[in-house]
Amino acid sequence: MNNKQILPEPYRAKMVEAIRLLPPAQRRKRLEEAGFNTFLLRSEDVYIDLLTDSGTNAMTDVQWAALMRGDEAYAGSRSFEALEAAVRDVYGFPFIVPTHQGRGAEHLLSRSWIKPGQHVPGNMYFTTTRLHQELAGGVFDDVIVDQAHQPDSTHPFKGDIDLDKLKALVQRLGQDKIAYAAVAAPVNMAGGQPISLGNLKAVSDFCRSKGIRVVLDAARAVENAWFIREREDGYADWTLGEILREMCSLVDACTMSAKKDAYVNIGGFLATHDRGLYEEAMNLCVVYEGLHTYGGLAGRDLEALAVGVREMVEGTWMDHRISQVRYLAARIEDAGAPFVVPVGGHAVFLDARRFLPHLPQEALPAQALSAWLYEECGVRTMERGTVSAGRDDQGRDRRPALELVRLTLPRRVYTQSHLDYVAAGVGRLYARRGSLPGLKFVYEPKRLRFFQSRFCPLPAAAATGANSDHPKASAY
Ligand code: F0G
């Protein structure tokens, strides 16, 4: 990796927030109190927070100014009109239903378009997306290319759908059993891997020929557009906005977590070309989110989001973001630690299987690695492995091929020297990796267990202990 130089951050600080590094003994104590789950740490006890890029963005001065223009009317807010206009201009969808965040939109979509027993093929699961599909009675089927499950495959578009897998599924079930195809761009759980426009078009053509609808998860679609421009023939001269609109023209609807691409701290929406979905989702919005002109958001949030949607495709924000992620990956590579390649747009994903080869999957290597990294240097990260994958409908642990720890970069928050510090911490931990123990569950909640589970360390020598009988609230 030769990407060692990056341009300085394309911003200057106008307001700062103090952070502090606890001494090692206190970090160990906090980790124990948090049940070795980084989600249960207090933010105050975290030095550099790479848990997520969701809602952790620093807004521009223009977005902050827009907050003051928020129209807090219950109905018909001017701020909703600003959002609607921005989404129409930037994404090209005529119909927009605002929601409090991405999973709100997933809920409305799943209830509107999934009939119990129907299947939803997609390019790898996402935690909340799959759960909403299942709660609506649907079954998720992974039809991503095999390379997505291989952390060392250098395929440039590991987010692509395997057309043969998709066609075989439709052939086997019949098109009436397919609620819609769910396309994430990029694929978070695979390491932030993009889908090519050529593949999205092929999926769209096939689905349209069968009368199957296609839904885009647009949370980080601008990042995906950046990779299309970099890697796919024919798009080098397109703007990010043009690529994004092209992507959206190939699908029937999108769900959006605006806490990512759109640089806000809260918000989301469902957007569509389909009037029927719009009317159904708008009606469900009133039940679950709030009136269809605020969807659980304050007027000021809508206003900041409207600005964020326009700004996200402009300037050098995305160039900088991706160069920051690559810079961190290059520093970690210098330290010798293994991570998923190619590096995606929002995070570096450490490969816990190769980082901790002495730990079997039952010893939860990715959960353990994220815990020990906090203890080592106060850096908070997130497990994306067995714990996140949850249980299948028989109550058995799912065993994903990927056991990853995500070092996610909040947008416009940290500087290059923060990244140097993080990489140095990863390097120190890697140097003493052989002594790091695994973890086992001591508590597991019913749904989305990664958020609230608690763990304890396995004795170093007995790292092979099975966790199949770990305590749980129910076999979800
Ligand atoms: N889709 C993708 C690809 C996501 O990454 C997320 C959230 C959602 C949907 C749900 O959106 O959080 O606004 O309800 N991802 C966060 C993360 C939680 O850390 O990756 P939400």
Image (cartoon, rainbow, N blue to C red):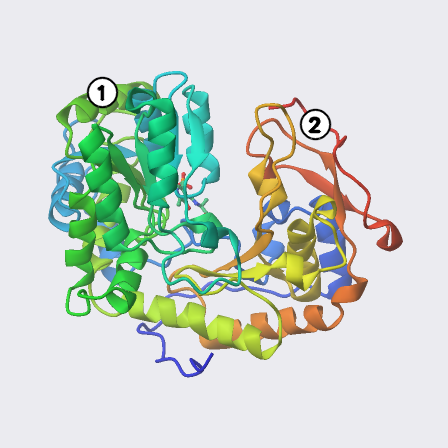
Q: Is residue 183 left or right of residue 472?
A: left
For image coordinates 43% across by 68% down, the residue present is 325
**Which image quarter: residue 275?**
top left
- Residue 359 visible in the snapshot: yes
Q: Is residue 10 left or right of residue 77?
A: right
* Residue 65 on image: x %, y %: 23, 55
Q: In the figure, 299 relative to 341: above or below?
A: above
For image coordinates 36% across by 47% down, the residue present is 259
SS label for mark 1: helix
**Which image quarter: residue 241?**
bottom left
**Which image quarter: residue 475?**
top right
The amino acid beneath tag 1 is: Glu
Q: In the figure, 172 relative to 465: above or below?
A: above
Of residues 414 and 232, the one drawn nearer to the viewer in this rendering: 232
Q: Is residue 153 left or right of residue 40?
A: left
Q: Is residue 344 left or right of residue 294?
A: right
SS label for mark 2: loop
Of residues 24 and 372, the one drawn nearer to the viewer in this rendering: 372
Q: Which residue is mark 1?
A: 280
- Residue 107 visible in the snapshot: no
Q: Which residue is mark 2?
A: 472
Q: Earlier in the sequence, mark 2 or mark 1?
A: 1
